Image (cartoon, grey):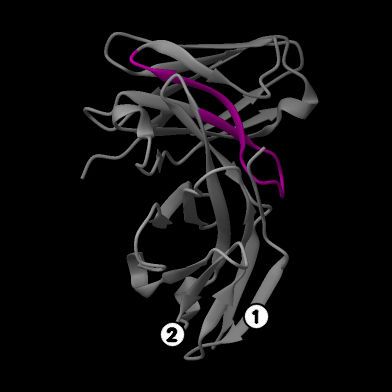
Amino acid sequence: AQSVAQPEDQVNVAEGNPLTVKCTYSVSGNPYLFWYVQYPNRGLQFLLKYITGDNLVKGSYGFEAEFNKSQTSFHLKKPSALVSDSALYFCAVRDGPMDSSYKLIFGSGTRLLVRP
Amino acid sequence: AAGVIQSPRHLIKEKRETATLKCYPIPRHDTVYWYQQGPGQDPQFLISFYEKMQSDKGSIPDRFSAQQFSDYHSELNMSSLELGDSALYFCASSLNGGSAREQYFGPGTRLTVT
Protein backbone atom coordinates (compact mmCIF):
# COMPACT_ATOMS: atom_id res chain seq x y z
CA ALA A 1 0.00 0.00 0.00
CA GLN A 2 1.08 3.54 -0.69
CA SER A 3 1.95 5.70 2.28
CA VAL A 4 3.75 8.86 3.28
CA ALA A 5 5.20 9.81 6.62
CA GLN A 6 5.81 13.21 8.10
CA PRO A 7 8.16 12.70 11.03
CA GLU A 8 7.73 16.14 12.58
CA ASP A 9 4.53 17.28 14.24
CA GLN A 10 5.75 20.86 14.29
CA VAL A 11 8.51 22.90 12.72
CA ASN A 12 9.53 26.25 14.16
CA VAL A 13 11.53 28.75 12.14
CA ALA A 14 12.31 32.45 12.33
CA GLU A 15 11.03 34.73 9.60
CA GLY A 16 13.57 35.15 6.84
CA ASN A 17 15.25 31.83 7.54
CA PRO A 18 14.99 28.83 5.23
CA LEU A 19 12.44 26.18 6.11
CA THR A 20 12.17 22.48 5.46
CA VAL A 21 9.17 20.25 6.10
CA LYS A 22 10.03 16.58 5.78
CA CYS A 23 8.17 13.81 4.02
CA THR A 24 9.17 10.25 3.19
CA TYR A 25 7.20 7.88 1.04
CA SER A 26 6.64 4.19 0.51
CA VAL A 27 5.13 3.19 -2.80
CA SER A 28 5.03 0.40 -5.30
CA GLY A 29 5.85 1.71 -8.72
CA ASN A 30 6.49 5.32 -9.59
CA PRO A 31 5.44 7.82 -6.92
CA TYR A 32 3.08 10.67 -7.61
CA LEU A 33 3.63 13.05 -4.71
CA PHE A 34 1.86 16.21 -3.63
CA TRP A 35 2.09 18.94 -1.02
CA TYR A 36 -0.99 20.73 0.31
CA VAL A 37 -1.32 23.52 2.86
CA GLN A 38 -4.24 24.03 5.22
CA TYR A 39 -4.95 27.30 6.97
CA PRO A 40 -7.27 27.33 10.02
CA ASN A 41 -10.88 26.53 9.12
CA ARG A 42 -9.99 26.37 5.45
CA GLY A 43 -9.74 23.71 2.80
CA LEU A 44 -6.52 22.25 1.51
CA GLN A 45 -4.66 24.30 -1.06
CA PHE A 46 -2.46 22.64 -3.64
CA LEU A 47 1.19 23.74 -3.49
CA LEU A 48 3.09 21.47 -5.87
CA LYS A 49 3.44 17.97 -7.22
CA TYR A 50 6.07 15.55 -8.48
CA ILE A 51 5.13 13.25 -11.31
CA THR A 52 8.30 12.76 -13.27
CA GLY A 53 11.23 14.77 -14.56
CA ASP A 54 13.33 17.22 -12.60
CA ASN A 55 13.88 16.30 -9.00
CA LEU A 56 13.39 19.92 -7.90
CA VAL A 57 9.79 20.97 -8.25
CA LYS A 58 8.70 24.58 -7.91
CA GLY A 59 5.27 25.48 -6.66
CA SER A 60 3.07 28.24 -5.34
CA TYR A 61 4.06 30.99 -2.89
CA GLY A 62 7.79 30.41 -3.38
CA PHE A 63 7.73 26.81 -2.17
CA GLU A 64 9.70 24.04 -3.78
CA ALA A 65 10.23 20.37 -3.07
CA GLU A 66 13.09 18.02 -3.75
CA PHE A 67 12.37 14.47 -4.84
CA ASN A 68 15.06 12.04 -3.73
CA LYS A 69 14.56 8.50 -4.95
CA SER A 70 17.44 6.94 -3.04
CA GLN A 71 16.20 8.38 0.24
CA THR A 72 12.51 8.01 -0.70
CA SER A 73 11.94 11.58 0.39
CA PHE A 74 10.01 14.58 -0.88
CA HIS A 75 10.88 17.44 1.45
CA LEU A 76 9.16 20.80 1.13
CA LYS A 77 11.42 23.84 1.21
CA LYS A 78 11.38 27.59 1.05
CA PRO A 79 14.48 29.80 1.02
CA SER A 80 13.00 32.56 3.20
CA ALA A 81 10.03 31.92 5.49
CA LEU A 82 7.23 34.40 6.06
CA VAL A 83 5.01 34.68 9.12
CA SER A 84 2.07 34.13 6.77
CA ASP A 85 3.47 30.69 5.89
CA SER A 86 2.40 29.48 9.33
CA ALA A 87 -0.11 26.71 8.64
CA LEU A 88 -0.59 22.95 8.54
CA TYR A 89 1.23 21.19 5.74
CA PHE A 90 0.29 17.79 4.34
CA CYS A 91 2.33 15.53 2.13
CA ALA A 92 0.25 13.14 0.02
CA VAL A 93 0.75 10.28 -2.40
CA ARG A 94 -1.56 9.23 -5.17
CA ASP A 95 -3.07 5.78 -4.75
CA GLY A 96 -4.54 4.18 -7.82
CA PRO A 97 -5.56 3.56 -10.46
CA MET A 98 -8.97 2.23 -9.62
CA ASP A 99 -11.38 2.84 -12.45
CA SER A 100 -9.90 6.27 -13.06
CA SER A 101 -9.92 7.26 -9.41
CA TYR A 102 -6.70 8.36 -7.87
CA LYS A 103 -7.38 9.02 -4.23
CA LEU A 104 -4.80 10.77 -2.11
CA ILE A 105 -3.21 9.20 0.92
CA PHE A 106 -2.12 11.91 3.32
CA GLY A 107 0.60 12.10 5.90
CA SER A 108 -0.18 13.09 9.45
CA GLY A 109 0.59 16.74 8.79
CA THR A 110 3.25 19.12 10.05
CA ARG A 111 2.42 22.39 11.70
CA LEU A 112 4.75 25.15 10.59
CA LEU A 113 5.18 28.09 12.92
CA VAL A 114 7.14 31.06 11.64
CA ARG A 115 7.98 33.55 14.37
CA PRO A 116 8.57 37.21 13.58
CA ALA B 1 -11.22 31.28 -11.09
CA ALA B 2 -14.11 29.12 -10.00
CA GLY B 3 -13.43 26.84 -7.07
CA VAL B 4 -15.09 23.83 -5.51
CA ILE B 5 -18.25 24.83 -3.66
CA GLN B 6 -19.53 22.97 -0.66
CA SER B 7 -22.75 23.50 1.24
CA PRO B 8 -23.57 23.93 3.94
CA ARG B 9 -20.37 25.20 5.52
CA HIS B 10 -21.51 24.30 9.01
CA LEU B 11 -24.06 21.75 10.14
CA ILE B 12 -25.22 20.74 13.59
CA LYS B 13 -27.20 17.55 13.98
CA GLU B 14 -28.26 15.32 16.82
CA LYS B 15 -27.44 11.65 17.17
CA ARG B 16 -29.46 9.37 14.92
CA GLU B 17 -30.40 12.22 12.60
CA THR B 18 -29.54 12.39 8.90
CA ALA B 19 -27.42 14.90 7.01
CA THR B 20 -26.81 15.71 3.37
CA LEU B 21 -23.64 17.45 2.22
CA LYS B 22 -23.39 18.92 -1.24
CA CYS B 23 -20.41 19.49 -3.49
CA TYR B 24 -20.20 21.45 -6.73
CA PRO B 25 -16.94 20.70 -8.56
CA ILE B 26 -14.94 23.09 -10.66
CA PRO B 27 -16.61 23.41 -14.10
CA ARG B 28 -15.54 20.66 -16.53
CA HIS B 29 -14.03 18.54 -13.74
CA ASP B 30 -15.34 15.00 -14.10
CA THR B 31 -14.10 13.40 -10.87
CA VAL B 32 -15.22 14.10 -7.34
CA TYR B 33 -13.64 12.82 -4.14
CA TRP B 34 -14.95 12.95 -0.58
CA TYR B 35 -12.63 13.03 2.43
CA GLN B 36 -13.26 13.13 6.17
CA GLN B 37 -10.91 14.97 8.52
CA GLY B 38 -11.39 14.34 12.22
CA PRO B 39 -10.06 16.78 14.83
CA GLY B 40 -6.28 16.87 14.63
CA GLN B 41 -6.28 14.15 11.98
CA ASP B 42 -5.23 13.95 8.36
CA PRO B 43 -7.93 13.70 5.70
CA GLN B 44 -9.18 10.18 5.08
CA PHE B 45 -10.61 9.15 1.73
CA LEU B 46 -14.26 8.12 1.74
CA ILE B 47 -15.48 7.68 -1.80
CA SER B 48 -15.02 8.97 -5.35
CA PHE B 49 -16.97 9.30 -8.56
CA TYR B 50 -15.83 9.52 -12.15
CA GLU B 51 -18.29 10.47 -14.86
CA LYS B 52 -21.20 9.89 -12.46
CA MET B 53 -20.15 6.36 -11.55
CA GLN B 54 -18.61 5.32 -8.25
CA SER B 55 -14.95 4.76 -8.98
CA ASP B 56 -13.44 3.92 -5.61
CA LYS B 57 -14.48 3.39 -2.04
CA GLY B 58 -12.48 3.90 1.12
CA SER B 59 -13.30 3.81 4.79
CA ILE B 60 -16.88 4.95 4.38
CA PRO B 61 -19.43 3.56 6.87
CA ASP B 62 -22.42 1.68 5.51
CA ARG B 63 -24.57 4.44 7.02
CA PHE B 64 -23.16 6.82 4.44
CA SER B 65 -23.97 6.90 0.75
CA ALA B 66 -23.11 9.24 -2.05
CA GLN B 67 -23.80 9.89 -5.68
CA GLN B 68 -22.78 12.14 -8.52
CA PHE B 69 -25.50 13.70 -10.62
CA SER B 70 -25.76 14.51 -14.31
CA ASP B 71 -24.45 18.05 -13.71
CA TYR B 72 -21.46 16.48 -11.88
CA HIS B 73 -22.38 17.79 -8.48
CA SER B 74 -22.21 15.25 -5.71
CA GLU B 75 -24.06 14.64 -2.48
CA LEU B 76 -22.94 12.72 0.58
CA ASN B 77 -25.85 11.33 2.58
CA MET B 78 -25.23 10.39 6.17
CA SER B 79 -27.81 8.56 8.28
CA SER B 80 -28.01 7.42 11.90
CA LEU B 81 -25.41 9.99 12.81
CA GLU B 82 -23.03 9.19 15.64
CA LEU B 83 -20.92 11.48 17.80
CA GLY B 84 -17.84 10.13 16.05
CA ASP B 85 -19.08 11.45 12.73
CA SER B 86 -18.25 14.98 13.89
CA ALA B 87 -15.56 16.09 11.48
CA LEU B 88 -14.67 18.33 8.60
CA TYR B 89 -15.85 16.84 5.30
CA PHE B 90 -14.00 17.88 2.19
CA CYS B 91 -14.95 17.49 -1.39
CA ALA B 92 -12.28 17.67 -4.06
CA SER B 93 -12.50 17.64 -7.82
CA SER B 94 -10.13 16.93 -10.67
CA LEU B 95 -10.17 16.55 -14.42
CA ASN B 96 -10.00 13.44 -16.57
CA GLY B 97 -9.89 10.95 -13.76
CA GLY B 98 -7.06 12.84 -12.12
CA SER B 99 -4.28 10.50 -13.15
CA ALA B 100 -1.49 13.01 -12.78
CA ARG B 101 -3.60 15.99 -11.99
CA GLU B 102 -3.92 17.63 -8.63
CA GLN B 103 -7.18 17.62 -6.75
CA TYR B 104 -8.75 20.93 -5.85
CA PHE B 105 -10.42 21.01 -2.48
CA GLY B 106 -13.49 22.85 -1.34
CA PRO B 107 -13.61 24.78 1.95
CA GLY B 108 -15.24 21.85 3.71
CA THR B 109 -18.41 21.26 5.69
CA ARG B 110 -17.96 21.15 9.43
CA LEU B 111 -20.41 18.64 10.84
CA THR B 112 -21.06 18.61 14.56
CA VAL B 113 -23.14 15.78 16.00
CA THR B 114 -24.50 16.38 19.50
Q: Nearer the viewer, residue B44 or A88?
A: B44
Image: A97 above or below A83: above
Counting from the top left corner in percent of width and height, residue A54 is at 35, 66
Residue on which the image places disc 2 = A79
Residue B13 is one of the magenta-drawn residues = no
Give the residue pinned by disc 1. A12
Residue A72 falls in which quadrant of the image?
Answer: bottom right
Q: Residue at x 62, y 68 (%)?
A: A71
Three-letter code for the amino acid on which mark 1 is drawn:
Asn
Residue at (75% x, 11% y) in the render = B16
Q: Secondary structure at mark 1?
A: strand
Query: In this picture, which residue range is highlighted in magenta?
Result: B34-51
Q: Which mark is residue B34?
A: none
Per the image, label 2 sits on a secondary structure element best described as loop
- Cβ atoms at labels 1 and 2 below 8 Å apart: no
Residue in front for this viewpoint, A25 or A84: A25
